[in-house]
Image (cartoon, rainbow, N blue to C red):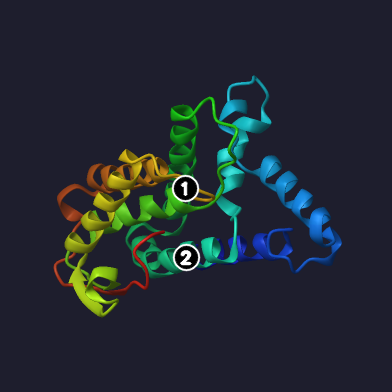
Amino acid sequence: MTYGLIAACCLVFLVSPVSGLNPVYGMGDELLAAQQAYFERWGVVPSELFSGAMRPLLAPATALFVHGSWLHLLGNMLFLYVFGAMAEERMGHLQFALFYLGCGYLALFAYAVAHAGSDQTLVGASGAISAVLGAFLRLFPKARVTSLFPFLFFLPLRFPAWVVLPFWVALQWLAALQGGQGPGVAYLAHLVGFSLGFVYAWVRYGRTARVKKPAPATEGDSQP
């Protein structure tokens, strides 16, 4: 399922106007117009969520497979590749897929509710992947994670997941408090997704969740 989700996100991006590789959408202003229409059709527009129409209510599901740029896509897929396989192995294929889609939907929905008056389109799998990180922390707290920290001159250092992931959450929290938002960035969705994932793993697996041996993992960035 992890590799299937990665393949689906990549395929959707490649055929979309955002990749710039599909000649159907033209060039210049025509391409920009196609990209804007694409985001509005498949992304979450908070101000439209409670309009009474069905399509906006489905948008948090479709938006999970839409990304705003190559960097946005590759960053998210890196995190899903690194953390998703181990979480899926613990949960099982079908349960992991439902967990990913459900938590991703709720994370984007929560963001839209909190910003109900906003017309800014929200896209990306960050909420779902944040849920995977939350579940990973509960399931594999002692797994060694290779991380790159700017204040340590980007040296690749290995730390337990219980050190790296709470640090990542703290960064998201600080950014959310500062109100920092941008294209493809919704820190509240990250926090909601992470919380949902952690709580789900805690409730679903209880004391049997944690593995006894440190499991290998690598991470190439600090922000999904």
Residue 216 lies in quadrant: bottom left
Three-letter code, disc 2: Gly
Position in image of residue 188 (x %, y %): 38, 40
Identify the residue at the far top of this view: 52
**Front one among 82 and 202:** 82
Position in image of residue 68 (x %, y %): 60, 55
Q: Is residue 149 visible?
A: no
Three-letter code, disc 1: Leu
**Front one among 97 and 81:** 81
Q: Earlier in the sequence, mark 2 or mark 1?
A: 2
Mark 2 or 1: the one toward you:
2
Position in image of residue 130 (x %, y %): 38, 52
The residue under label 1 is: 98
Q: Residues within 10 Å of mark 1 (few under 14, many from 20)?
A: few
Left or right side of 60 for 53: right
The residue under label 2 is: 75
**What SS does tag 2 mark?**
helix
**What SS does tag 1 mark?**
helix
Q: Residue at x 19, y 47 (%)?
A: 206
Left or right side of 144 for 54: right
Q: Residue at x 61, y 65 (%)?
A: 10
Q: Are marks 2 and 1 in contact (CB under 8 Å)?
A: no
Q: Which mark is residue 128?
A: none
Q: Quadrant of the C terminus?
A: bottom left
**Front one among 2 and 208:** 2
Q: Is residue 154 visible?
A: yes
Position in image of residue 189 (x %, y %): 42, 42
Left or right side of 51 for 138: left
**Front one among 197 and 187:** 187
Q: CA distance from mark 2 to mark 1?
A: 22 Å
Residue 168 lies in quadrant: bottom left
Q: Residue at x 62, y 43 (%)?
A: 43
